[in-house]
Amino acid sequence: MRATINGKRVTDKESLHALLRQKLNLPQDCGRNLDAVYDLLTEPGKDRIITVKHPELLRQRLGDYADRLFRMLKDASESGHVKLIIK
């Protein structure tokens, strides 16, 4: 599965988590936190290619939370179930 997270569409944490649920086909009851997203991304048999566009906008709009997002995605990519591309 391929998904693109576009920083232009994110204004705050809520919009980020709504976008993650939509683009990554996460269940609606997925916790609105990065730990829950990580757990779902690293489930075996659900490999994903995630492209992050406009990461600088995510950093401007989310501050430290964007850094936590990028760390979580990098950690998920090390699981072997996620390929991460940042443009």
Image: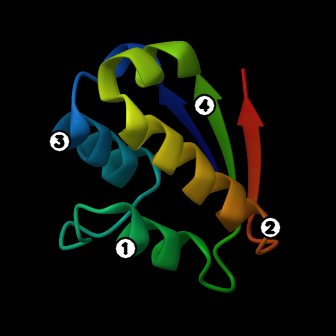
Identify the mark nearer the N-term, 2 or 3. 3
Give the residue type that dot 2 points to: Glu
How far is disc 4 from disc 1 in space, using C-alphas?
19 Å
Determine which of the numbered discs, if any, sits on residue 52 in the image: 4
Residue 56 point in image, percent of width and height? 54, 15
State the mark number for residue 36. Answer: 1
In the rendered image, is residue 54 in sight?
no
Tell me residue 10's x, y (percent): 31, 24
* Side of 85 where 33 appears, left or right: left
Q: Label 2 neighbourhood size at 10 Å, few (<14), some (14-19), many (20+)? A: few
Task: Residue 10: give its label.
Answer: none
Q: Amino acid at mark 1?
A: Ala
Name the N-terminal-most of marks 1 and 3: 3
Residue 60: x and y in percent read 39, 15
Which residue corresponds to mark 3? 14
According to the picture, the residue beneath numbered tag 2 turns out to be: 78
Q: Residue at x 70, y 68 (%)?
A: 47
Judged from the image, the secondary structure of the residue bearing numbered disc 3 is: helix
Q: CA distance from mark 2 to mark 3?
A: 26 Å
The amino acid beneath tag 4 is: Val
Image position of 14 with respect to 71: above or below: above
Q: Secondary structure at mark 1?
A: helix
Label 4 vs label 2: CA separation?
A: 16 Å
* In-image side of 83 versus 73 (left or right): right
Q: How many marks?
A: 4
